[in-house]
Image (cartoon, grey):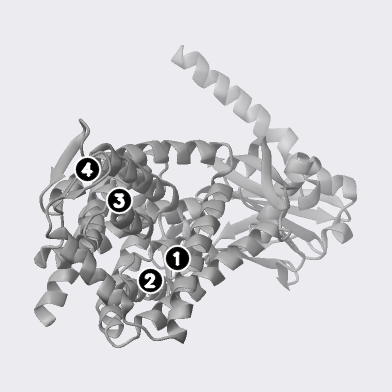
Amino acid sequence: MKFWSVLFILVFGFALTSPAQAARKVVAANLTDNFVGISEGFDGAKLTLFGVLKNKADAIVVIEGPPVEAKVRTKSRQFGIWINGAPATLPQVPSFYVVASSQPVDKIVSEETAVQYGLDIDKLSFAQDTAGAGYVDVKKDKGLFATDPQGVRILESSLFRVDIRLPPSVPIGTFTAHIYEFSKGVLTAERTENFYVAQIGLNAWINTKANGSPVLYALLALALSLGIGGGSAYLVKRMS
Amino acid sequence: MDIYLPVAALSIDALWLIGLGAVVGFLSGLFGVGGGFLLTPLLTFMGIPATIAVGTQSCQLVGTSLSGALAHWRRRNIDVRMGFILTVGSFIGTGFGVQLFKWLKQIGQINLVIVLAYVTLLSAVGLMMFFESAPRLLKNSQRIRSGARSLREEEHKGMTQGWGAGGSFAVDFHVSNLRVNVLLPIGLGIVGGLLVALLGVGGGFVLVPAMIYILKMPPALVNGTSLFQIIFTTAFATVLQAVTNHSVDVVMALILLLGSVVFVPLGARLATNLKPEVARLLMSLLILSVAGKLVFDLFSTPVHLFTVETRGLL
């Protein structure tokens, strides 16, 4: 059993990696960091991606955050005030989506190609109905969905650099950076890099406790609150 | 100085939080009210989700009410028996309120309910304070003190007979020198518990007048007894909110608490120098402007016509 599965993987592995993949090359690129830790004083982070392009090619980089399920409610005016309506559920949408490019995307590829590779944030497959478009709208406002037509900077002839800015409200989980190289509107090479965002230190500890053992967490919070309240009452009495 | 709030999962300037805690602490020292009813709206104006503001406040209130209750304890201004009976009611109210909170959150109407409840409470309290303090400022009076004295004289004539004092549920409260149907304080406790669970306030500004006018407790014992009961109610609410709604951010609670405990004594000191009518008038204007802002937000077209709520998939 084990032998056969190993053999299967070997044979198919070769079949997949050899001729079919050879036609499309891999962009040489690397992230300066693969991990972003959210500590007590976190106010956003910056990651840098370096890479090499073929001559005169353009690069588009899509940074995508971990998938989430989203409930979108549309507000409507009732009795003069704005009230949430019934929710529409988007089963799986990216929590973060930034498209950075060396020039505006429509100058690099055709509209069709942009839609195919998800390079236009207003034309993502899930964003075609009211709820999807609303989701993108809210995310744009929070800086979690964005387009940056100058985001990929060509440094010298073929070397490029992307500064990925993550806002303080950045979601937690695995992010992917898809790097696409286009020559005359045709995809010539690509690559996918991953990085991780997680709470670290005291934050991570608090969050694990708050979600994993909420009773213990609440009792701990109560003890601290009582300690500060009681301590201050004692100090005020001593001072007066 | 930005600080990351781990449960709210957002970053905020810690100085703003300390400042807000300080303002609320100062006000509670000055007016003897908890000030929680200003904190929740102000936190939402700063971008904290209303659900997190409410859950976190209950945790912070445990510390502030303990600190206040200790001062009353030293002056023997607490009716412990009454406090525990109120607590029985408030636990029922809190338990029900937290489930209601969860349900309202699920159907996406929790923010609306919180805002509407605040608008109602703030307008009522604000208008009452305004119309009580403004005329008094115009004609300086001494009537308040003489009124209190006559009430105290009345107490010495024997036990006050409250509502249902002759019925089968009547209970004696020796410290308050009062006999009343036990269902009345339990009912008041339920209201208090609902306020804690849904709005993140101690509920003192509702309970205190109710205890004076409905329960007929001696005014001197009311503040201390209310605070004493609030310690247990908010502690219970903290546990339930943390378990049911995951809406208690301990980092935010402690920062607010630190800001507030430092400024309570300062407010209390200033209170002795400030004319009470002036203080109440200022407070009423502050409360009414917060209510006004909430009403304005309810009616004005929102930036987004959409509300998004996400849940991680991994």
The answer to whether A87 is drawn above or below residue B26 in the figure is above
Q: Nearer the viewer, residue A128 or B60?
A: B60
Residue type for callout 3: Thr
The residue beneath circle 1 is B38
Residue A168 seen anywhere in this rendered image of the structure: no
Q: Looking at the picture, which amino acid does disc 4 mark?
A: Val
Picture coordinates of residue B109 (x, y %)?
A: 58, 43
Residue with the mark numbered 4: B180
Query: Residue sitting at 24 percent across and 46 percent down?
Result: B162
Q: Which residue does the numbered mark 3 point to in the structure image? A: B234
Q: Quadrant of residue B204?
A: bottom left
* Separation (CA) of disc 4 from disc 2: 35 Å
For the point 45% across and 53% down, which residue is it?
Answer: B52
Q: Are marks 3 and 1 on the same chain?
A: yes
Question: Tag 4's secondary structure?
Answer: strand
Please tell me which residue lies in front, B115 or A178. B115
Residue in the foreground of this view, choosing between B251 and A189? B251
Cβ–Cβ under 8 Å for marks 2 and 3: no
Mark number, residue B24 = 2
Q: Alpha carbon of mark 3 to alpha carbon of mark 4: how far?
A: 25 Å
Marks 1 and 2 share the same chain: yes
Circle 3: is it few (<14), some (14-19), or many (20+) Cα within 10 Å? many
Q: Is residue B255 at least partly visible in the picture?
A: yes
Determine whether, in the image, residue B263 is placed left or right of residue A195: left
| Relative to B115, B155 lies left or right | left
Could you say whether the residue bearing mark 3 is in a helix, strand or loop? Answer: helix
Mark closer to the chain start, 1 or 2:
2
Identify residue type, mark 1: Leu
Looking at the rendered image, the disc whose residue lies closer to the viewer, 4 or 1, is 4
